[in-house]
């Protein structure tokens, strides 16, 4: 994709910006003229992405963030307004799978545990980051967007927010919450010209999916279930974020953009 003016003059906050979909979205937004404040819990990686963008002529800065902290969200929005003057775009991308972070490769086709195998601790943590973090981000940024005269909020859900599977009920529940919460927010703040949409990726090659995709049996099964016959890339999802963030999507709100290689069409 060639550089262009699709986000010229706009200011974006991108969470989960240190790697995967978040990092690629930050890069793509900057390439298209946005000033980007990217956040992540991983400060070293996050700073490196901001420095990379700046070195290539873009405008980006980094702030460490726990998306489950309401106070930190207030600070992030204030920092974006102080540094860049306004906030036009929020991409809620930060998320966790709920699988054991020490697991380098998924064992077997089913990962994440069935309901009887998931603990309340895991459930609460997944909901805290994926669902509550999204709620807090939307709540924090709305006043800034009202001051700016409108904006675009993009919440990353998943195909797991649309269909069920054999495992990881907590992840499904969190992403389903993001999906329907986005619709409620879209209706409530449409009068303020604030658009809210959700994106539902399928199987994308990212650090979060690496344990599953490192298992050849799992990788083969997931590709076989995807009509286009490959895993998605972070750039595939970032392109959807770019569209929804741009004025090209000025009449799009409360929508679900499914980017899954055709998987949920089966």
Image (cartoon, rainbow, N blue to C red):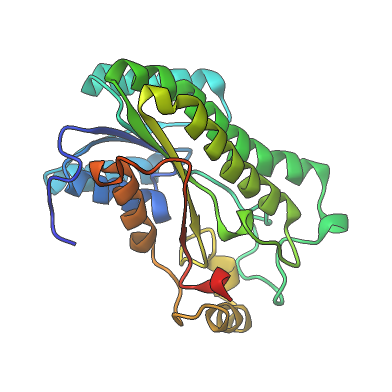
Count of numbered badges drawn on the protein: 0
Closer to the camera, 139 or 48?
A: 139
- From the viewer's perspective, is residue 28 above or below residue 113? above
Percent x, y of residue 223: 53, 80
Q: Position of residue 109 (x, y in %)?
A: 70, 76
Look at the image and tell me in which quarter the C terminus lies. Answer: bottom right
Q: Position of residue 165 (x, y in %)?
A: 71, 65
Residue 5 quadrant: top left
Residue 126: quarter of image? top right
Q: Against 3, is 211 above or below?
A: below
- Which residue: 72% across, 71% down? 110
2 left or right of 208?
Answer: left
Which quarter of the rendering shows the N terminus? Answer: bottom left
Q: Is residue 157 depicted above or below 193 in this figure? A: below
Q: Residue at x 13, y 54 (%)?
A: 3
How far across and how far down the image is residue 142, in percent?
A: 43, 22
Which residue sits at x=62%, y=53%?
161
Residue 51 shows in the view: yes
Farthest residue, direction right: 116
Q: Give the quarter of the image for residue 112.
A: bottom right
Residue 19 shows up from this direction? no
Which residue corresponds to the image point at 26% horizontal and 21% vertical from the top-left?
Answer: 86
Q: Is residue 21 left or right of residue 222?
A: left
């Amino acid at each position: 994709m060639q550089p262009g003016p699709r986000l010229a003059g706009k200011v974006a906050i991108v969470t989960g910006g240190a790697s995967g979909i978040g990092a690629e979205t930050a890069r793509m937004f900057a390439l298209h003229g946005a000033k980007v404040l990217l956040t992540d819990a991983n400060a070293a990686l996050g700073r490196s992405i901001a420095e990379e963008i700046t070195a290539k002529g873009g405008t980006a800065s980094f702030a460490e963030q726990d998306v489950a902290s309401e106070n930190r969200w207030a600070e992030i929005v204030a920092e974006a307004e102080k540094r860049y003057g306004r906030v036009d775009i929020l991409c809620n991308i930060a998320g966790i799978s709920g699988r054991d972070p020490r697991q380098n490769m998924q064992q077997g086709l089913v990962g994440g545990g069935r309901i009887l195998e998931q603990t309340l601790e895991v459930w609460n943590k997944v909901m805290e980051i994926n669902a509550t973090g999204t709620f807090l981000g939307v709540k924090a940024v709305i006043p800034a967007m009202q001051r700016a005269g409108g904006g675009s909020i993009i919440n990353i859900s998943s195909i797991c927010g649309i269909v069920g599977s054999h495992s990881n009920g907590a992840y499904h529940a969190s992403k389903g919450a993001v999906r329907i919460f986005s619709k409620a927010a879209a209706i409530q703040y449409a009068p303020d010209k604030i658009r809210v949409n959700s994106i539902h990726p399928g199987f994308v090659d990212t650090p979060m999916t690496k344990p599953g995709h490192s298992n050849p049996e799992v990788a083969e099964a997931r590709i076989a279930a995807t009509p286009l016959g490959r895993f998605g890339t972070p750039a595939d999802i970032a392109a959807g974020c770019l569209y929804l963030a741009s004025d090209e999507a000025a009449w799009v709100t409360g929508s679900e953009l499914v980017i899954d290689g055709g998987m949920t069409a089966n």
